[in-house]
Every structure is written in structure tokens, then in C-alpha cells.
Image (cartoon, helix red, strand yellow):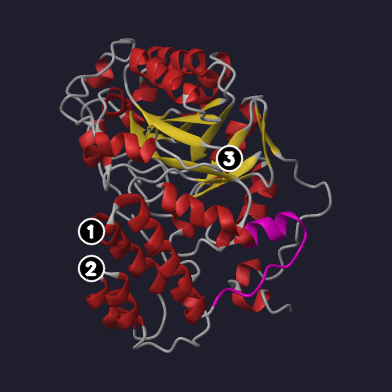
Amino acid sequence: MTAFRAHVSPENRAVPLAAAGEFAPLQLGGLKVDPPVVLAPMAGVTNYPFRSVCREFGAGLYVSEMISARGYLNGHRLTRLLASSQPGERPRSVQIYATDPKDVSEMARSLVDSGVDHLDMNFGCPVPKVTRHGGGSAIPLKKKLLAKIVAAGVAGAGAVPFTIKVRKGIDDELLTFLDAGRIAQEEGAAAIGLHARTAAQLYSGEADWSAIAALKSSVSIPVLGNGDIWESFDALRMMRTTGCDGVIVGRGCLGRPWLFAELAAVFAGREPDVPPNLRRVVAIMEDHARRLIDFFGPEVGMRQMRKWCSWYTKGFRNSSVVRESLVRVASIEDMLAALRTLDLDEPFPMAALRAPRGKTGRQNSVALPHGYLATLDDDTPPDESAIGDDAESFEGSLSGG
């Protein structure tokens, strides 16, 4: 057993590395993604600072957190900031949230003009605040509306690849992913990503990889699989099991951006390096905090960093006690002082490999507008005013992961 294999879960210790030529690069229109790995758009998470940290560990496609089209078009400062980039971020990818085809088309054109290389559209949000107003994962129930929105996005994006991301459906009785795949293909989308859970599942239970395989067999456009990629070998198993064209990595990289280095290695047929010990993790945390401060300013940057402190330290001995201080840190110095009370030479803990970070949630009954299921042929966009149209309305509520 290699040194790295001793640091993976038992189910992955015998998984073969990728053979030469086994997996092709992911082709999205004229954009080639190699290895075929995509960072899931996650609200409050995949801002530029975190994308830049991840990018330094491995190649792939790093998608922004979900950006409200209304907020962007109305010029909300934070929404515009979250949609922004820095020189050198290539390829640049932004995920859009909207329910009105006109907004989608206009925002897509604006983002393309600003230099975006890839656009994604969220049709998978399971949050009651959104679905009860007919947005997010409720939209694929209305096939005509879904088709109009996708067509508008494709037209607005022009030569830039436009993809969509969905869940299996509302619940096990209202599955929409196969229809969504057909519509995405018919309306010119470059690919479709599937989070293999229903909206009712939220982030609980196991992802249903068989749904990814079913979607792949039903369409000719690329299919991206999302759900339960906690370790690099999970990505290889998903692609071999489902035949999907690429993987979307969500909660598995929270507090573990080096996962992208491990993914790059296994897709190249190499054993990855051993995961970092706590001393190296602390160095990554400090770097991440500085990037957040540079992007958001000292107060907001450190407030953002608090959740990351919990994710980075999860599983390390005595970290639960230190996290009581970390959730209140106001400066990098405060953060480092708290971390110095731990054993910085401790290896990365096995127990933290598959430990959920970020959203978990139990199964719930999905809230839909009154009479929604009786009007599924209606292609009228829902009213977004009750949801809110700026970044603050979405952060902490919506996630593509």
C-alpha cells in the first residue's frame, strides 16, 4: 500500500488509478476542461478567494457561487463583486440564478462581454424560500418555462458554452431530471450537471449515482455527475460506474482545497501526495484568510473566514474546543493564536475524510406555490420579488453543491 492509500477510506484503497487515455477531457463547446473536474457553485463559498486557492492545487473548471440575475442587472454592489474576477482567472465561470428568460439573456450577454468563458444556470436549489415561489428546483416541473429559460441563456451566451445544473426532481414521485436533460439538449445547452439527490433530500442520504447513468444514456450532450465526491478515487468510481463525462465536486473540498491536487494526480495516473498535516493546513488557512481580506476587506473577510476555520480543523484532536474561539475571530492573529494551542504536527485525520462539512439537512417536504402542480403547462416566470434579488438574499440559502 502506498503512503497515500493509507490515508484513504477502505472502500477506495484498491481503486485503480486512471489508465492512459481512459478519461477524455471534458469538452464544453470550445472549452476543454482537463482533468474533467468542476468545482460546484456554492453560495457563500465559491467566491474568488476560494476559487483562487483551489486553482493553485489543480486544474479544472472553478465556478462562481450562484449570482442573482436581478441583483446583477440592478447593480447591487455585493452581487457585482461576487460575479467579478481577477486577471489570470482562466477559464472564468459564473453560475446564474434567475426565473425570467429576459433576465437570463441580458445577464448572459453582459457576462460574456466582461470576458466570461463559461456560464451555468441553477435549476436545483431546494431551499423553501426559493421553491415556494416557483424558483430553483421547482422550475424543471414546468417544462415549457425551463425550455424558454435555457433557450434565452444559450442565445445570450452566444459562442460561450452555457450549461445547466439540476437535481433528480422534487421527490421520488416528481422526478424531472430526464426531461431536463432532453430540454437542455434540444435548446442547445453544452452540458447538464446532475446532483443525484432530490430537492426533498436536501443534502442527506447517499447520492443516487444510477440516476447519473440513466441521464447519460438518455442524452448526447456531456453529463456531469455531482454527489458524494469526498475523495479523489470517488471521482474515478463515479465516472466508471455511470459513464458520465466529468465530476462536480461540492462539499468534499470544503476545508480541503488540496482535494483538487489529488484529483489531478489520479486522473493523470499518479498516486497523490499524503494529505497535509495540521501545520500545513494552518498555512493554507492563513493564505485563504489573507485572500478573503484582500477581496472583501478586513471585517467581512474575517467574518467569512470563521466558517472556514471550522471546516479546515474538522477531525483534528481538541479542535472542537478551539472552534469555540475560531467562530469569533476578528483577525488573522486571533486565528493563529487559537490554532497554536493544537498539535501542529498532527497528521490529517482519517475520520475527517468523509465527514460532511457545510450543508447537511434532513429530508423535508418541498414547498411549492399554491396550485403549482395544476399549472405545469404555464410558462409564465414566477415572481422573484419575494425571494430578493441581491447577494445577501442568496448567501447561506442557496447552493449548487
Q: Position of residue 302 (x, y in %)?
A: 28, 62
Number of other residues with Cα within 10 Å of mark 1, as a class: few under 14, some 14 to 19, many 20 or more: few
Judge whether 222 appears above or below 374 on screen.
below
Q: Earlier in the sequence, mark 2 or mark 1?
A: 1
Q: Earlier in the sequence, mark 3 or mark 2?
A: 3
Q: Position of residue 374 (x, y in %)?
A: 25, 16
Distance from Cα at disc 2 to Cα at disc 1: 7 Å
Number of other residues with Cα within 10 Å of mark 2, as a class: few under 14, some 14 to 19, many 20 or more: some
Number of other residues with Cα within 10 Å of mark 3, as a class: few under 14, some 14 to 19, many 20 or more: some
Q: Position of residue 254 (x, y in %)?
A: 43, 60
Contact flag, marks 3 and 2 (Cβ < 8 Å): no
Q: Is residue 187 magenta?
A: no
The amino acid marked with disc number 1 is: Glu
Distance from Cα at disc 3 to Cα at disc 2: 32 Å
Judge whether 24 appears above or below 53 on screen.
above
Specify whether residue 171 is in view.
no
Q: Which residue is mark 3?
A: 90
Magenta segment main secondary structure: loop
Q: Which residue is mark 1?
A: 299
Q: Is residue 269 magenta?
A: yes
For image coordinates 41% across by 42% down, the residue present is 400
Query: Is 398 on the left or on the right of 299, as rendered?
Result: right
Q: Quadrant of the N terminus?
A: bottom right
The amino acid marked with disc number 2 is: Ala
Query: Is 91 on the left or on the right of 173, as rendered?
Result: right
Q: Which residue is mark 2?
A: 330
